[in-house]
Every structure is written in structure tokens, then in C-alpha cells.
Image: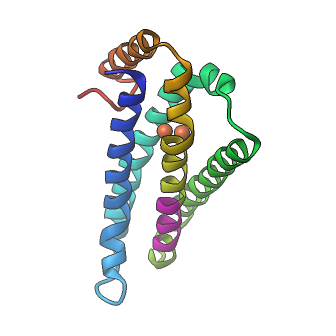
């Protein structure tokens, strides 16, 4: 299992958490009001996974990300998905902290936006960045990084301790 496989496992877990975060509240539209306590619990789980995943990407691939050759359009798309996702996360976090006792209805919309921005970022990495990394780095190096990322995850600093 190389580093790209590790990251793809993380992406699947993140998509699962984003779905858990948004689907009960999407279904709640027009029905029972969304449960704020549950939403906050789901948010915490999502943030934990997301921070661990970004840490793995930063720790193991930040240099490679800089070296990988993307054309101007791809580079702009990648930067834009990171920017949009960071902004959605900030809004989402601020909303959770500042909405004590208030309705969670607007929070649901922020959560849905976060899910969409997450998907745009993950799919950009999968479509644009990961294939370039695989093409430009030696397979042994990718496997070594994967083993180190998994060892780190087992020590509690990543999300792929499966
Ligand atoms: Fe990322
Ligand atoms: Fe990623």
C-alpha cells in the first residue's frame, strides 16, 4: 500500500463522515428539526478526521506537491478548492461555536456547503494531483511514505490506522 492508497482510504472515510454530517439534516428538511447535539458530535468526528488527513498530506507530501508539474489551470483549480474548503471549514466552525441555543437550520446549509467543497477538493486531488504524483515519484518511495504514514496513524497522528 503506497501513500496514495493511504490518502484514498482517508478520502473514503472523509466522504463517509461528511455524509453522516449532512444526510440526517438534509432528510430533516420539512420534517423533524435537526438535532443540534448530534450535529455537533458529527462535526467533531469530521474535524478530527479532516485535520489528521491534512496533517498526513502536509507531513509526507508537501514537498512533492510543490514539485509536481501541474499546468496553470490545474494549479489554479487545486488552489481554489483548498481556499474554498478552508473558508467553508472556518464558517462551519464559527457557526458551531456561536450558535448555542439557537436553531440549527442555517447550520445545515453551512454543513451542506462544506460537504460540496470537500468533494470538490478531494476529487481535484484524485483527478489532477494523485496521478501526477504516481507518475513522477518512484514506486518504492511512494510505498515507503505509505508505510511511514500508516505507522504514524497507528501512533495516533493520522486517520488510516486500519
Ligand atoms: Fe487535501
Ligand atoms: Fe486529500
- The residue at the point 37 percent across, 68 percent down is 36
Q: Which quarter of the figure has residue 52?
A: top left
As drawn, which residue projects farthest toward the left?
162
Task: Residue 89: give x, y in percent of width and height.
Answer: 56, 53
Q: Nearer the viewer, residue 54 or 100?
A: 54
Task: Residue 23: give x, y in percent of width and height.
Answer: 32, 69
Task: Residue 117: give x, y in percent of width and height.
Answer: 55, 58
Number of marks in picture: 0
Position of 100 relative to 14 (above/below): below
Q: Nearer the viewer, residue 102 or 114?
A: 114
- The residue at the point 33 percent across, 15 percent down is 151
As drawn, which residue projects farthest toward the right?
72
- The residue at the point 38 percent across, 17 percent down is 152
Position of 147 relative to 20 (above/below): above
Please identify the dominant SS of the magenta region.
Answer: helix
Rendered image coloring scheme:
rainbow
Residue 17 falls within the magenta-colored stretch? no
Position of 4 relative to 96 (above/below): above
As drawn, which residue projects farthest toward the bottom?
30
Position of 23 relative to 62 (above/below): below
Query: Which segment is the magenta one?
Result: 108-116
Locate the C terminus by quadrant. top left
Q: Is residue 76 left or right of residue 150?
A: right
- The residue at the point 49 percent across, 25 percent down is 134
Locate the N terminus by quadrant. top left
Task: Residue 6: give x, y in percent of width and height.
Answer: 36, 28
Q: Quadrant of ligand 1?
A: top right
Amino acid at each position: 500500500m503506497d501513500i496514495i492508497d493511504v490518502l484514498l482510504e482517508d478520502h473514503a472515510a472523509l466522504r463517509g463522515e461528511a455524509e453522516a454530517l449532512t444526510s440526517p439534516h438534509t432528510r430533516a428538511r420539512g420534517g423533524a428539526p435537526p438535532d443540534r447535539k448530534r450535529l455537533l458530535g458529527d462535526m467533531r468526528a469530521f474535524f478530527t478526521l479532516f485535520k489528521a488527513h491534512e496533517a498526513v498530506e502536509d507531513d509526507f507530501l508537501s514537498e512533492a506537491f510543490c514539485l509536481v508539474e501541474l499546468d496553470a489551470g490545474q494549479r489554479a483549480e487545486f488552489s481554489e478548492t483548498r481556499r474554498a474548503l478552508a473558508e467553508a471549514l472556518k464558517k462551519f466552525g464559527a457557526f458551531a461555536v456561536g450558535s448555542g441555543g439557537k436553531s440549527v437550520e442555517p447550520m445545515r446549509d453551512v454543513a451542506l456547503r462544506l460537504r460540496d467543497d470537500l468533494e470538490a477538493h478531494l476529487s481535484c486531488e484524485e483527478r489532477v494531483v494523485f496521478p501526477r504524483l504516481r507518475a513522477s515519484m518512484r514506486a518504492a518511495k511512494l510505498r515507503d511514505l505509505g508505510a511511514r504514514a500508516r505507522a504514524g496513524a497507528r501512533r495516533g497522528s493520522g486517520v488510516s490506522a486500519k
